[in-house]
Amino acid sequence: MSPVSVNDEMVAQRVRRIELSGIRKMFEAAPPNAINLGLGEPDFEPPREVIDGLCEAVRHGQNHYGPSAGLPELRDAIAERYQDRRPSTARDNVIVTGSGSEGLMAVALSLLDPGDELLVPNPGFVLYGPHARIAGATPIPYSLRTERRYLPDFDELERLVGPRTRAIVVNSPSNPTGAVFPRAIVDRLLDFADRHDLTIVSDEVYEEIVYDGPATSFWGRSDRVVVVNSFSKTLAMTGWRIGFLVAPRDLAVDLNKLHYHILACPSTPAQAAVLAGLRAGPSATAAMVREFRARRALVTRLLRNIPGIEVTAPAGAFYAFPRFTWPRTALEVATELLHRGVITTPGEAFGSLGAGHLRLSFATSRENLRRGLAILREYAIELAEAPAE
Ligand SMILES: Cc1ncc(COP(=O)(O)O)c(C=O)c1O
């Protein structure tokens, strides 16, 4: 039987405007047993309390629909975590989502009308641009350049903002750059958003995975902020799909309408499990971050020993984002490495300014990192010795 094919005309314009993520494409082409430096998820299991919490919830009948904005106890527990940023943060500010990804989609659909513009980081996480397009809006990339330590250029932002700009997406700690915005940059972004009546969509899913001191949250410092967050990374439960939004009350009501129409409600047993994890305290995340910190040092050291590579030690998340000087595109380099048995993500997957970079995830064992980077080094030495093309 021939495979069922989809006639182009069956598919809405908004689907034709978006592509499958470059990360997925790379991953799907990988040979078996490849060393995976492409993963965007912790190589740890969720804390014991979270696993026990899930089993218990399922065994004790928490298998049904719940409130669309999430279980009240979980919303309260999340709100409590945000009270040091804004003491009045309460349940009404919190919506539990079916992941950070769903939260981002609900935010894009709630904030953007067709024809609007959304400022998105370049390089930046792969969903921001497509979500804007799905909403009928136009993503306008703003630069995060290596020379500026992956921090925004405010002169450029002033040039990019226009009458249809509705919001700006910020992501600190950043995927893919690993940069964490210093407080002064957060303050300037808040001021920029204020002057131009923009909403700040702050993707803080890596906020607890930091190495040189805490990340400054955007929450609590303005009424124009929506925080997108997730338990995927901090509780090592990417497959469970639980995240949350923190937003001003009125906006939270509207976000919840969208969220209800996308998802009805987040998974009830997974929420019960997260609640058990929050009650158990931060020690599991802290242990994971300790290991990531050691790997960050290892990866940075090994990369600095590779000819043609330049790297800034990431201050957060679990990615190194080295820049190379070889006469190759990042896609060519990543493809050649894939043939040698190492999965990496080409920087272009994150936007045009990702060109000349690879994203290497250190959410894998130190042994894998050593082996993978030895292959990268060998490749670099061969390139350096090859006659000029
Ligand atoms: C910056 C960033 N935001 C959001 C997400 C979405 O995470 P999830 O949908 O698993 O909550 C990711 C996942 O890789 C990410 O890197």
Image (spheres, rainbow, N blue to C red):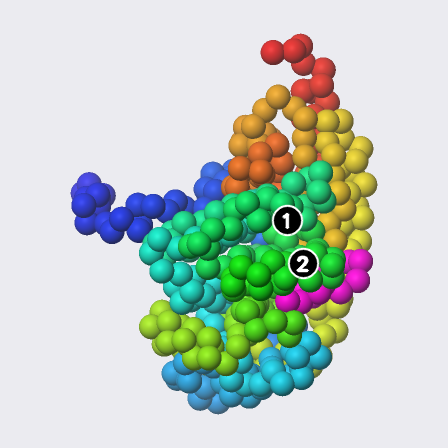
Which residue is painted at 81% across and 41% down in the image?
A: 301
Mark 2: few/some/many CA within 10 Å (<14, 14-19, 20+): few
Image height check: is 253 above or below 16? below
State the image coordinates of residue 185 (x, y, percent, origin top left): 70, 56
Image quadrant containing the N terminus? top left
Local SS, label 1? helix
Q: Amino acid at mark 2?
A: Arg
Q: Amino acid at mark 1?
A: Phe
Quadrant location of residue 285? bottom right
Q: Main secondary structure of the magenta part?
A: loop
The one nearer the camera, 51 or 6, is 6
Which residue is painted at 57% across and 73% down in the image?
A: 223
- The reply to whether residue 380 is in sight is yes
Image quadrant containing the C terminus? top right
> In the image, which residues are magenta?
207-218
- The reply to whether residue 239 is in sight is no
Which residue is painted at 46% across and 59% down in the image?
A: 166
Q: Quadrant of ligand 1?
A: bottom right
Looking at the rendered structure, which numbered label has been put on residue 330? none
Quadrant location of residue 35? top right
- Residue 214 inside the magenta-drawn segment: yes
The one nearer the camera, 315 or 267, is 315
Q: CA distance from mark 1 to mark 2?
A: 8 Å
Mark 1: few/some/many CA within 10 Å (<14, 14-19, 20+): some
Image height check: is 277 above or below 306? below
The one nearer the camera, 109 or 34, is 109
Q: Which residue is mark 1?
A: 154
Of callouts 1 and 2, the N-terminal one:
1
Image mark count: 2
Q: Which residue is mark 2?
A: 188
Q: Are marks 1 and 2 in contact (CB under 8 Å)?
A: yes
